[in-house]
Amino acid sequence: MSGLGGLNKSPDGVVIGLVQIQNPIVVTPEDLARQTNRICELVGKARRNLATMDLVVFPEYSLHGLSMDINPAIMCRMDGPEVEHFRGACIANDIWGCFSIMEFNPHGNPFNTGLIIDNKGEIKLYYRKMHPWVPVEPWEPGDLGIPVCDGPNGSKIALIICHDGMFPEMARESAYRGANIMIRTAGYTAPIRQSWHFTNQSNAFCNLMYTASVCLAGSDGSFNSMGEGMIVNYDGTPLATGNGIPDEIITGEVRPKLCDEARIHWGVENNIYQFGHRGYVAVKGGARDCPYTYMTDLAAGQYELPWERQVKVTDGTSCGFKAPTRMFKPVPTSLRPGKLAAE
């Protein structure tokens, strides 16, 4: 049940709106300002569309489009006018919002950044995309981990971005940190449609967690994004599914309390608990070791596939980017903008 798309809100419900925003073309600072205003207009549309809505979600690239342009003139800063306008729109419409920016990085390539802003204009969650869609995307690897924030009406929210959702570890980490709703924003195009559907469902089921996911929609003259907003129940069942119509808002209600109850009371298929308590019928508390070599190797900085040396695409040259020469170094905490209460 999704309360007829959120029209009938439960006392413990969270109504989510997923904006399948038209895939924009942004080349100049003037284009950026125009698209910022368009997003703020759609925040207002979301509020007018559904008085019960708690959270409106915009897809990845909703501000910058799919050009992969890293021109500093159109990159954003946390204290810049774009974020300030988004904060103002949330205040003016008394609604929480999830937004996408490409964030200027003085230490390397820009970050692909997501923000959740509450109805008072406060930034509650600040996330940098962990897994840029290689070899297509030039963004710096995220260095903030996967934060979780308290959301409206008893929700705990995580945000991941697009390709992140293809790694089951991202959803597992979100749930492990307490999220009962995981948002996934994306700019995906049609070839990814089936993968989009089943990963959104498996990420929900494997972690007893609601997922709410949305892509851009429409064409920019080069790429057709697919829209496909979808809200999935914690048992993996789709509650609301979208289409490819630009600027349509897909809505539905989730009930975090029910998700929390399932995590406590389920025996069969309580997978996120059972993962760390293997075979608890046979041994008290279950086995709590780490038998997975990919985890121990990754933690030791020794991750290497059996076919590692045979992999052909290991940089972005096939997509027109120069091969990088510098190694990854997380930005020092003291140089990161905007400390959050949730950190």
Image (cartoon, helix red, strand yellow):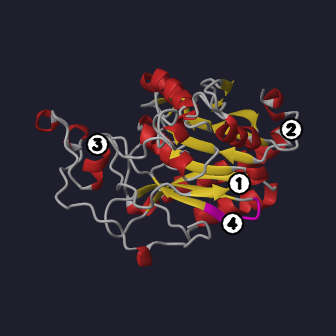
What distance separates the C-alpha of mark 2 from that of mark 3? 43 Å
Specify which label sits upstream in the sequence, 4 or 1: 4
Label 4 or label 2, whichever comes before in sequence order? 2
Element on which disc 3 rests: helix
**Mark 3 or mark 1: which comes first in sequence?**
1
Residue linked to disc 2? 9
In the displayed structure, 54 sits above or below 330; it is above
The answer to whether the residues at label 4 and label 2 have Cβ atoms under 8 Å apart is no
**Residue 152 percent location from the top left of the image:** 76, 53
User: Which residue is outermost to the left?
Assistant: 309
Q: Decide which of tag 2 and tag 1 comes sooner along the chain.
A: 2
Percent of width and height locating residue 319: 26, 39
Kind of residue sitting beneath label 3: Tyr
Q: Which mark is residue 81?
A: none
Residue 188 lies, with reference to residue 174, above or below; the image says above
Q: Label 1 amino acid?
A: Gly
Which label sits in the foreground, 3 or 1? Answer: 3
Is the residue marked by circle 1 packed among few (<14), some (14-19), or many (20+) residues within 10 Å?
Answer: many
Res 84 seen here: yes
Query: Label 3, on which residue?
Result: 294
| For residue 43, above or below residue 1 | below
Residue 163 makes an appearance in the image: no
Cα–Cα gap, marks 4 and 2: 25 Å
Circle 2: residue type: Lys
Residue indicated by mark 4: 122
Name the residue that disc number 1 marks.
151
Q: Main secondary structure of the magenta part?
A: loop
